[in-house]
Image: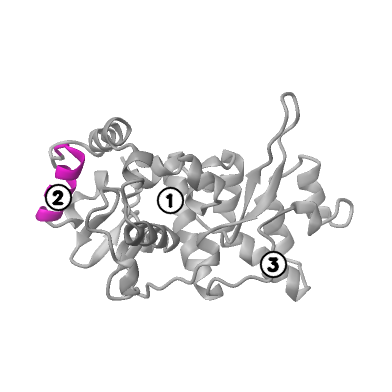
Amino acid sequence: MPFFISSNLEILEEKKIFEFQKKFGIILSKKQNSKQRFTIIQNSLKNKMNFVEIFSKFNKDEVLSFVFLISQFGDVSSEEIPIEYSYFKSNPFVLEWKEKHFTIPFEIFEYLAHEKIFKEQNYLFSLISYLPIKEKKSWMKWLNIISEGESEKEMNLEIYNQCRILQKQFEGKSYLTEEEFSIEKLWIQGSNQYLDWYYKGISNFYYSLQELSKIEKDPFFYRIIQEIKSGKFILKKNKVNFGEKDSFKLVSTVEGKTVQFREKLFFWEERNSNGSLFQSS
């Protein structure tokens, strides 16, 4: 699972830190605090690492490998993936943090999340960033994630991490085939009290689904609710004209349609009483 380099230098090998710094033209030191390191990385991304320009220079194998890495929630071991998707060496957005282990650091995920291509193609990591904060908090509560004191970018990573865990069981399959659809296509207004709370603005979407999941008896709808919980489908804002009220639809995510190859679980991917390596400050 991706992690913040800025607060986790200690898990990287020295030569890997050096290679990362060389690609970005920066100097990271353990004497700097995590906020300073985060700012240094972000400034380099904004000023030196134009994604469209860099991406346009990738060859076919590099493009496919990068897209595959993102579909694997940004972290793979070359021992567990097809060799044709292992061309990462020349990609500055990918860090080999350990021999044969490649990741997209979460500072970079935060940066790429706002690139138009990832939002338009419905990548989960991107659309999480655009969710209303109230929906994120409701989703986190449903996922049993403690969110008090966490910044919004940390919330994004926590949700993303749990989605990877939950999606593993589905093997990229879904009961729904549509790429996008209105919420009312599943739950017509007036037919379900929990979703009516959402339609009337009384509650958030993810809170309504959490409550519905407790009593839903129909196997089909229960499965769909679990798929939404796992991020196989996510809320995305509809295009509206000026002055119109915001409205949302459900869209199928790229990550949600992909079989997850990695079996290995790293220690920071499980929350514990001592906190989490996800923290950026």
Q: For marks 2 and 1, give the CA distance.
A: 24 Å
> Secondary structure of the magenta portion, mostly?
helix
Label 1 amino acid? Leu
Q: Residue at x 40, y 62 (%)?
A: 68
Q: Is residue 26 above or below residue 258?
A: above
> Where does the C terminus fall, quadrant-wise?
top left
Instruction: Check the image and report above or below for 51 versus 210.
Output: above
Badge 3 local density, few (<14 within 10 Å), some, or many (20+)?
few
Sequence-first disc among 2 and 3: 2
Q: Position of residue 82 (x, y in %)?
A: 35, 74
Q: CA distance from mark 2 to mark 3?
A: 43 Å
Instruction: Tell whether 62 sits left or right of 240.
Output: left
Q: Quadrant of residue 74?
A: bottom left
Query: What secondary structure is found at the residue carrying circle 2?
Result: helix
Q: Type of residue at label 3?
A: Leu
**Residue at (42% x, 64% y) in the render:** 72
Task: Compare residues 199 and 49 and report the one nearer the observer.
Answer: 49
Task: From the viewer's perspective, tell me whether residue 216 is left or right of residue 91.
Answer: right
Instruction: Give the magenta range.
Output: 14-27
